[in-house]
């Protein structure tokens, strides 16, 4: 039996990339995992099929995490359907590099809605249904701690998650619920353009890009019983990119 046997986890944005790796890892550890997607239904189904073929349990649910109603519906319906909720991983997000002078109000609102507003209200819904000693993990970005021009709206939206985590960790601590934030460095999810791939490898002392499984292993630890004494933390998972 895995360390998460009997637990229920929601991983947003888990049809591909880091989210997929996290969902697959938590399923291997025994959790029933809700695979969330926005538009890529086939990819989400493939993730769930892979988990189930390996002996795990997964179900697929759709939601637009930039909409408060959808974000909260995903959490509440999953908890009701599965009888409990133990883990919420806020991974869904959007990277849209735009210089300040080129960023439109529409783009700014869209980035903040998906990267910050949706996760906030998903956590609000989760706080109402999470089991005592539950776990919340937010996925931010190492860019929030680097001097990275040309993506200020994105960086600001991700930085919000770090502050949410610090404050909510205090609010939810009486119930034993931990809230932590993981900051991946440049990670090979298949969407990085060549300039970013080169930049990431050069900036890391390991001289390589991170792999989604590297991040998934960190998250798996944070949602485990062994991490019960860690909360309100901002954890850099970038191979030494930020020291």
Image (tube, helix red, strand yellow):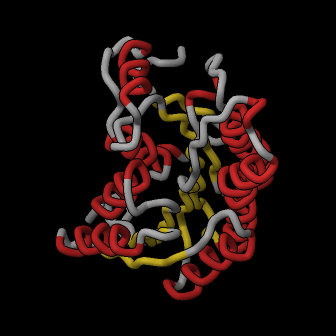
Q: Whole-percent x and y of residue 237? A: 46, 31
Instruction: Point out residue 233 in the picture as x, y percentages from the top left corner.
Output: 63, 35
Q: Extreme bottom residue here?
A: 81
**Residue furthest front as drawn:** 102
The residue lying at 52 percent from left, 62 percent from top is 12
Q: Is residue 71 left or right of residue 21?
A: right
Q: Is residue 63 left or right of residue 46?
A: right
Residue sitting at x 76%, y 47%: 108
Residue in the image at 65% along x and 16% along y: 147
Residue 229 can be seen, yes or no: no
Q: Is residue 97 above or below residue 29?
A: above
Give the quarter of the image for residue 117. bottom right
- Between 55 and 71, the residue placed more toward the observer is 71
- How many numbered circles does the render carry? 0
Whether residue 167 is visible here, answered yes or no, is yes
Q: Nearer the viewer, residue 187 or 56?
A: 187
Please tell me in which quadrant of the rendered image residue 127 appears.
bottom right
Quadrant of the frame with the N terminus: bottom left
Q: Is residue 27 above or below residue 79?
A: above
Viewer-closest of 107 and 10:
107
Residue lying at 49% horizontally and 70% vertically, measured from the top left: 39
Which corner quadrant of the image does residue 49 belong to? bottom left
Q: Position of residue 206 (x, y in %)?
A: 33, 16
Residue 4, image x and y in percent? Answer: 38, 62
């Amino acid at each position: 039996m895995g360390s998460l046997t009997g637990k229920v986890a929601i991983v947003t944005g888990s049809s591909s990339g880091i989210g997929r790796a996290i969902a697959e890892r938590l399923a291997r550890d025994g959790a029933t995992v809700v695979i969330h997607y926005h538009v890529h239904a086939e990819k989400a189904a493939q993730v769930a099929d892979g988990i189930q073929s390996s002996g795990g349990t997964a179900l697929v649910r759709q939601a637009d995490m930039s909409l408060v109603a959808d974000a909260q519906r995903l959490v509440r319906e999953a908890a009701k359907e599965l009888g409990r909720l133990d883990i919420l991983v806020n991974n869904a997000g959007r990277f849209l590099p735009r210089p300040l002078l080129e960023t439109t109000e529409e783009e700014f609102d869209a980035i903040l809605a998906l990267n910050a507003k949706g996760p906030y209200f998903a956590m609000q819904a989760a706080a109402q249904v999470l089991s005592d000693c539950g776990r919340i993990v937010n996925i931010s970005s190492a860019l929030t701690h680097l001097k990275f021009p040309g993506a200020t709206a994105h960086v600001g939206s991700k930085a919000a998650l770090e502050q949410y985590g610090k404050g909510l960790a205090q609010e939810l601590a009486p119930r034993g619920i931990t809230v932590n934030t993981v900051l991946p460095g440049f990670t090979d999810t298949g969407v990085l353009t060549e300039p970013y791939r080169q930049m990431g490898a050069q900036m890391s002392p390991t001289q390589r890009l991170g792999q989604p499984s590297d991040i998934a292993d960190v998250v798996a630890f944070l949602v485990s019983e062994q991490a019960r004494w860690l909360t309100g933390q901002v954890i850099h998972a970038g191979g030494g990119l930020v020291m």
